[in-house]
């Protein structure tokens, strides 16, 4: 509990200084979703929170190669008094990628209790991503369900 309180304080401080960004996606789908992050010239810290109403697998790969980059998406500064575009991380949705090193696999939701949904822990699961690297994310639902993805991230200065 103390560790979680420290993480929440850290995020609040980043938010107040205009250095905390977020992006989110909500979908109802039975198909797999794929997207890429390309980090800029600084390490990126990120925390995710994922929700689904049925069993869904979330996977992150480092150092992927892409065949379809996808459509760039907007990151938003959590402190609306600061610009949205002051981070060098670029996000792409609808990507196709291969290879890379598996970093993380998480599951949410349940096949035995559809509709109840579940959320993966967000606070305390921080990852630090390498600069100038492509990261691939895959979201694979077991059947048509509601999915919500929330990412919070910041760069080292």
Image (tube, rainbow, N blue to C red):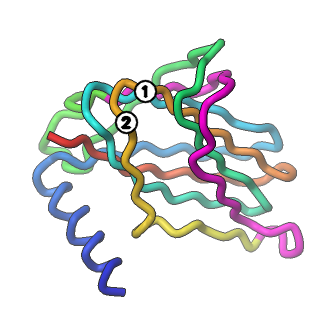
Q: Are marks 1 and 2 in contact (CB under 8 Å)?
A: yes
Residue at 65% across, 58% down: 106
Q: Which mark is residue 133?
A: 1
Looking at the image, the residue that sits furthest to the top is 67
Image x and y of residue 93, in percent? 57, 27
Indicate the position of residue 142 as horizontal and vertical percent values: 85, 52
| Closer-to-camera residue (64/22) | 64
The disc placed on residue 130 is: 2
Q: Name the residue located 52 percent from the left edge and 69 percent from the top edge.
A: 121
* In this view, 67 is above or below 9: above
The region drawn magenta spans: 89-115
Query: Which residue is the extreme one toward the bottom?
Result: 1
In this rendered view, identify the residue nearer to me: 38 or 101.
101
* Alpha carbons under labels 1 and 2: distance apart: 6 Å
Residue 115 vs 16, above or below: the answer is below
Q: Residues within 10 Å of mark 2 (few under 14, many from 20)?
A: some
Label count reads 2
Query: Residue 140's spot in the image, x, y percent?
Result: 76, 45
Picture quarter with the C terminus: top left
Check the picture and name the quadrant holding the N terminus: bottom left
Instruction: Determine the image quadrant of residue 10.
Output: bottom left
**For mark 1, does the 10 Å Cα neighbourhood hold few (<14), some (14 to 19), or many (20 or more) residues?**
some
């Amino acid at each position: 509990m103390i560790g979680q309180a420290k993480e929440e304080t850290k995020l609040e401080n980043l938010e107040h200084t205009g250095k905390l960004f977020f992006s989110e996606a909500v979908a109802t789908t039975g198909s797999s979703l794929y997207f890429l992050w390309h980090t800029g010239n600084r390490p990126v810290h990120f925390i995710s929170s994922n929700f689904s109403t049925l069993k869904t697998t979330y996977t992150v790969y480092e150092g992927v190669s892409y065949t379809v980059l996808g459509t760039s998406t907007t990151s938003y500064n959590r402190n609306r008094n600061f610009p949205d575009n002051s981070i060098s991380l670029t996000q792409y949705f609808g990507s196709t990628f291969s290879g890379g090193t598996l970093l993380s696999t998480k599951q949410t939701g349940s096949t035995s209790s559809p509709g109840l949904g579940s959320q993966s822990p967000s606070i305390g699961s921080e990852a630090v991503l390498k600069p100038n690297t492509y990261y691939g994310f895959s979201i694979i639902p077991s059947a048509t369900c509601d999915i919500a993805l929330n990412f919070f991230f910041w760069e080292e200065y």
